[in-house]
Amino acid sequence: MAEIARLPILVLTGFLGSGKTTLLNRLLRDGPRTAVLINEFGQTPVDHELLERQDLPLMTLSGGCLCCQIKGALAPVLKNLWLAWGKPGAPRFDRIVLETSGVASPEPVLDTLLRDRWLAGHYALQGVVATLAVPAAAGQIDHFPEAKAQAAWADALLLTQADLGTPADLALLESRLDALAPAVPRFQAAHGAIDPAALLAAMLGAERKMPGGTEVPGHGFRSLSLHLRTAVSWPLLREVLENLLDRHGARLVRIKGVVHLRERFEPVALHGAAGRLYPPAVLAVRAGQDGLGRLVFITAGPLDGLDGELLEGLRGHLAEGSLRWH
Ligand SMILES: Nc1nc2c(ncn2[C@@H]2O[C@H](COP(=O)(O)OP(=O)(O)OP(=O)(O)O)[C@@H](O)[C@H]2O)c(=O)[nH]1
């Protein structure tokens, strides 16, 4: 029987805010035409708006993590993508990149990709790339089993945000990785600047680690999303978000969103992670934008009082009933 060509699939993993979407944007700039599958933990999807290219087939799986809450969604989505592939008039693509959520353990995802007979017969896993932010990754590996698993299951490790870390941060992370994944090739990239061919080539000879179990313990993470119905002044929003990051420290593990600022016509992407608020990045205005701002907050464990502080700080800007915990 003739063997069917299998579609390559590349998995991006890495803790919240470690630079997966930044790397994805780099991978999509050139190379094979790619269909993108993004899994976000928060209920309100944001990442698709952060993609520089909007002309590629894209599917978003939000509101849970592919390693647990919505694990069962991966196989049907990939089957549908395969069926769409090659249909006359359907958008062409020659590989899939799957960006997992920042709290996903890769093992159950790999279990689905490698052990589901249909998927294994139609998709060829290219490898697992894990992004690790130099200033924060060693602490995340120590505190979150998900971050440890991401490094341990990777076929290539991409150290990001070295410009924000100290030589001591880098040395500490290197020592964690020496213990956890000594043989896995390591790269460094600032703002996603990496040669994709080198990254992929490094994974070619990787010995495939076969997943042993599909069950992971439930996450302790929660997400809160809100909609802003008006443009907010940047000094006000910055103060509210910086106060949250200061006051809630290590438990507020991620802030991300797309918002409208009074000072700008175009929407901006906002990011906060590991106690740091990143400078807002201007986004191209795209058709279909509804003018609402969206922010997602992810906490490690319950975070009593955070919603109250947001209500208070952004009074008058929040769309009615938009503040939701998940
Ligand atoms: N200074 C600096 N910032 C970076 C670098 N790489 C990424 N960033 C910034 O880090 C923030 C988070 O990056 P993302 O690519 O969104 O991280 P992510 O892993 O996709 O985050 P999640 O979707 O929450 O899992 C953004 O503001 C990026 O611009 C880098 O090398 N240096």
Image: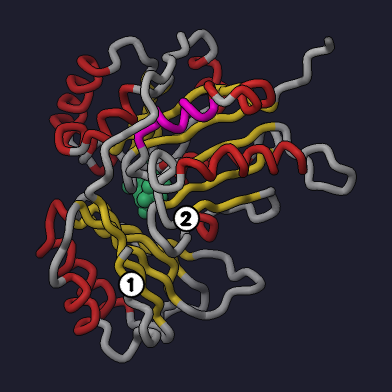
Residue shown at 72%/37% (left/top)? Answer: 82
In front here: 84 or 28?
84
Task: List the single residue furthest toward the left.
Answer: 247
Task: List the single residue furthest toward the bottom.
Answer: 316
Q: For mark 2, does the 10 Å Cα neighbourhood hold few (<14), some (14 to 19), or many (20 or more) residues?
A: some
The count of marks equals: 2
Of the 4 image quadrants, the one containing the N terminus is: top right
183 vs 97: above or below: above
- Locate residue 96, reporting x and y percent: 62, 36
Q: Secondary structure at mark 2?
A: strand
Residue shown at 28%/12% (left/top)? Answer: 182
Q: Is residue 109 magenta?
A: yes
In front here: 14 or 146?
146
* In-image side of 31 versus 150 (left or right): right
- Locate residue 224, reporting x and y percent: 31, 66
Q: Is residue 120 magenta?
A: no
Q: Which mark is residue 324?
A: 1
Of the 4 image quadrants, the one containing the C terminus is: bottom left
- Locate residue 249, reporting x and y percent: 12, 56
Magenta-highlighted residues: 105-113
- Locate residue 286, reporting x and y percent: 62, 69
In front here: 295 or 145?
145
212 vs 140: above or below: above
For the residues marked 2 and 1, what is the alpha-carbon distance in whole angstroms? 15 Å
Residue shown at 62%/28% (left/top)? Answer: 119
Q: Quadrant of residue 247?
A: bottom left
**Can the viewer see residue 75?**
yes
Query: Mark 2 near ligand 1 (CB under 8 Å)?
Result: no
Type of secondary structure dominating the magenta stretch: helix
Residue that numbered label 2 is attached to:
62
What type is the residue that disc 2 sits on? Ser
